[in-house]
Amino acid sequence: MSLSSNPRRQHRFQPQDAASYCRCRAFTLVEMLVTLSVLSILLLVIFSIINQTSSMWTRTSRNVKQFQSARVAFQTLTRLLSEATLNTYYGVTYAGGKPTRYDRASDLHFVSGTPLATGLNAASGPGSQISHAVFFQAPLGNTDLPAKYGRLDSLLCVCGFYIQYAQEAGRPTFLEAMPSVPTKAWRFRLMQLVQPTESFPVYSNTTGNGWIKNMMTAPAAGTWVHEIADNVVALVIMPVDPTPAATSIAPNFDYDTRINGAIPAQMPGTLAQLPPVVEVVMVVIDEKSLLKLGNPATPPNFGQATLFKSAAMLEADLATLQANLNASPGNAAGNRISLESRVFRTRVALRGAKWTTE
């Protein structure tokens, strides 16, 4: 048998066969360009996604950090507010020296709302109030005499929250003389007041809110008041009757347990009664946004002086404040600098309330 007739004889590549084989395995220049173009587009899309994710993460982390103190302050406010007490009792009402009937009474006091209700207006100096405030008594057990009262952790204390525009406090005096130390920052500040039980002032004035003014101007007032959050531009305290349709029981936001105030006919009086539920709204702007305003000694106008006067206008007023902060065209405050803000909002049930329509 000849070699050419052997079926197992290996095929030998001819030169023309090798050239044909190489041509079918290579990429053309056009294919390379298309591949590089597709790869570049994919890389661009991936880079864009990573950049957007990174920016979102940075912005979210900054927002969480910026509003962290405000969130903690809001939780503190709502927690302490839920512990408010009034210790209501029924006392005898006299007319012409004769007993006429039994009526609700309390030596304690709950007051909230505008400066008109709390008495902390712009002329009150350190007690100046922006938007709303609330003052009440609660069993907090705070004392400056721990040796005597330290173990009585349920003693009544005065507690209050309000906003003022003030400079930074608590900086050591020797730092002020150093040229490298920046000027004290002016900020909207949420202030908390906790007066120790041994200085309890409520019984000194049982007919109105004069005890609040006396407390704020007392020599030790500076040790009772401290800041718990910066950049809080508005605080709204709205007492609510949860039945039947969560109706406000303070049409102008002002609520005073020592006054049987002007309220709708279908609602009971406020005399010696804690509101059953209080809606709390707090509006905060972040520090980075506020730096755009500089460091003015007078509070920037965001319209708070004309807002939050009527409970029926709460939603509209919040929208107006947001427009003012966002520098929306034609905003009521005329603000031209857009500020990032956050709204904290919840309803707090007052456990000590004994709400009745009788």
Image: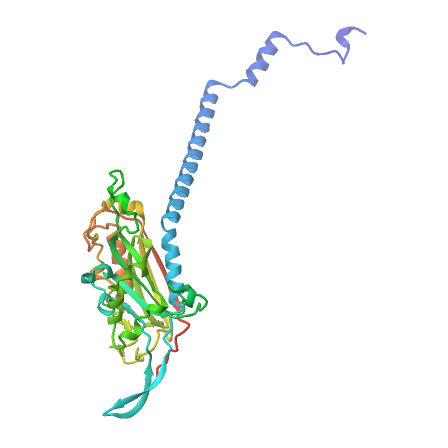
Quadrant into which the C terminus falls? bottom left
Relative height, residue 47 to residue 314 (above, below): above
Q: Which image quadrant for residue 284?
A: bottom left
Q: Which image quadrant for residue 156?
A: bottom left
Relative height, residue 111 to residue 63 (above, below): below
Relative height, residue 89 to residue 114 (above, below): below
Asked whether residue 310 appears in the rendered view, the answer is no
- Looking at the image, which residue is at 75% across and 7% down? 4
Q: Which image quadrant for residue 248?
A: bottom left
Q: Nearer the viewer, residue 232 or 249?
A: 232
What coloring was used for the rendering?
rainbow
Asked whether residue 135 appears in the rendered view, the answer is yes
For this orientation, the residue located farthest to the top is: 2
Looking at the picture, how far across and down is residue 109, in whole percent? 31, 73
Q: Nearer the viewer, residue 202 or 295?
A: 202
Relative height, residue 180 to residue 228 (above, below): above
- Looking at the image, which residue is at 21% across and 60% down? 125
Q: How many marks?
A: 0
Quadrant into which the N terminus falls? top right
- Looking at the image, which residue is at 27% across and 74% down? 204
Looking at the picture, how far across and down is residue 45, in whole percent? 43, 34
Asked if residue 340 lies left or right of residue 52, the reply is left
Looking at the picture, how far across and down is residue 26, in whole percent? 54, 17
Looking at the picture, how far across and down is residue 117, in whole percent? 24, 69
